[in-house]
Amino acid sequence: MPYLHLEHSFELESGEKLPRLSIAYTTHGKLNDRGDNVVWVCHALTGNADPVEWWPGLVGAGETINPNKHFIVCANILGSCYGTTGPSHFEPNTNQPYGLDFPLVTTRDMARLHQLLAKYLGIKKVYLGIGGSMGGQQLLEWAVIAPDFFKHLCLLATNARHSPWGIAFNEAQRMAMKADETLGTNQPEAGRRGLEAARAIAMLSYRHYQTYDQSQGETDKDKLDDYRASSYQRYQGEKLWKRFDPSSYWVLSRAMDSHHIGRGRESLEKALSTIKARTLVIGIDSDILFPVAEQSELAEHIPYSRFEIITSDFGHDGFLTETKTVSLLLNDFLSDQFNGRLPSPRLRKKAAFKGNFVLPGSEPF
């Protein structure tokens, strides 16, 4: 995986400074001579910089986002544990990992970091920016910072500000992490139990009643213990522990809480109204973490937007699992009717699609 190393300080929205930066990223495909085939993918909370790995069925050879046609870029976000500067990096003054002392970062900081990478790669315009959940939050910030940079946006299961409901879920996870006294220490497997418990809490917000009813229901009516739903929660916690750093989870959940597109910009509505990109907003009808009312709000205030609702039994994770439906919507959106002429301001087209298309091995974000 390539890295961009910047040997100068980066001031965060909080006012704190990181003395140097590393940005881990991937590219797939080639930038064409006109420079107009860039697709920038922003990943969500625990994702990494390779969307071919975590978004199969949408990104990859032969898919809607295709390296044979597009120059696909994805950068690991600030504060993560997959290469970009984060808690596992060494703080220059102490020569020790930042850990839980890593400064507060915001989705606005992440967008500004993407800008630095885009400049380094010589990208002057992005044909399509796409991201779900926290990835969509980053794109919204970037599209407000640089309204002329994107031609199209696709925002899935995301919002203009993180809700009290979402913040409460994140705080419950951090409380579980803090209950693990090894968090932030040098002990073996420090923070493991807390992270596993946090992930189990998160799964309840990512999925839906119907998801568990269909996939974790019991056939043995006489069973008294060791239920499938219980083992599934433990399994998801253990799986995240094997691939993600507790300190990064802590930092990134706080970053998500801070998301508010209207901060310092007069109002949320005013900020959204400055977006110039033609925008496809997609909501998931069973999403309890980012309910469709939040996507409706985006579509209401982004001038050239189209709003679609997907029916799914997979809750918030539908933006990752329902790739067949997302591809259909995205292909239609990028068709000649939108490339040949600008749609009327505040165009609304609401449609429900029955997804139920689950890729083998698809993962929560």
Image (tube, rainbow, N blue to C red):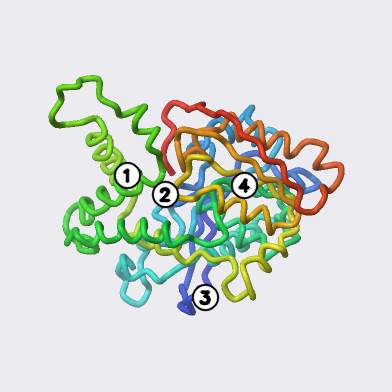
- Mark 2 or mark 4, which has the lower sequence index? 2
Q: Residues within 10 Å of mark 2 (few under 14, many from 20)?
A: many
- What's the mark number on residue 240? 1
- What's the mark number on residue 130? 4
Q: Is residue 210 above or below residue 101?
A: above
Task: Residue type at mark 2: give it.
Answer: Thr
Q: In the figure, residue 115 lies in which quadrant?
A: bottom right
- Mark 3 or mark 4, which has the lower sequence index? 3
Q: Report the residue marked by disc 2.
A: 46
Q: In the figure, residue 80 lies in which quadrant?
A: bottom left
- SS category of the residue bearing label 1: helix
Nearer mark to the viewer, of 3 and 4? 4
**CA separation, marks 4 and 1?**
24 Å
**CA separation, marks 3 and 4?**
26 Å
The image shows residue 6 at horizontal and vertical percentages of 53, 66
- SS category of the residue bearing label 2: loop
Q: Residue at x 49, y 56 (%)?
A: 77
- Mark 4 or mark 1, which has the lower sequence index? 4
**CA separation, marks 1 and 3?**
30 Å
Q: Residue at x 74, y 50 (%)?
A: 278
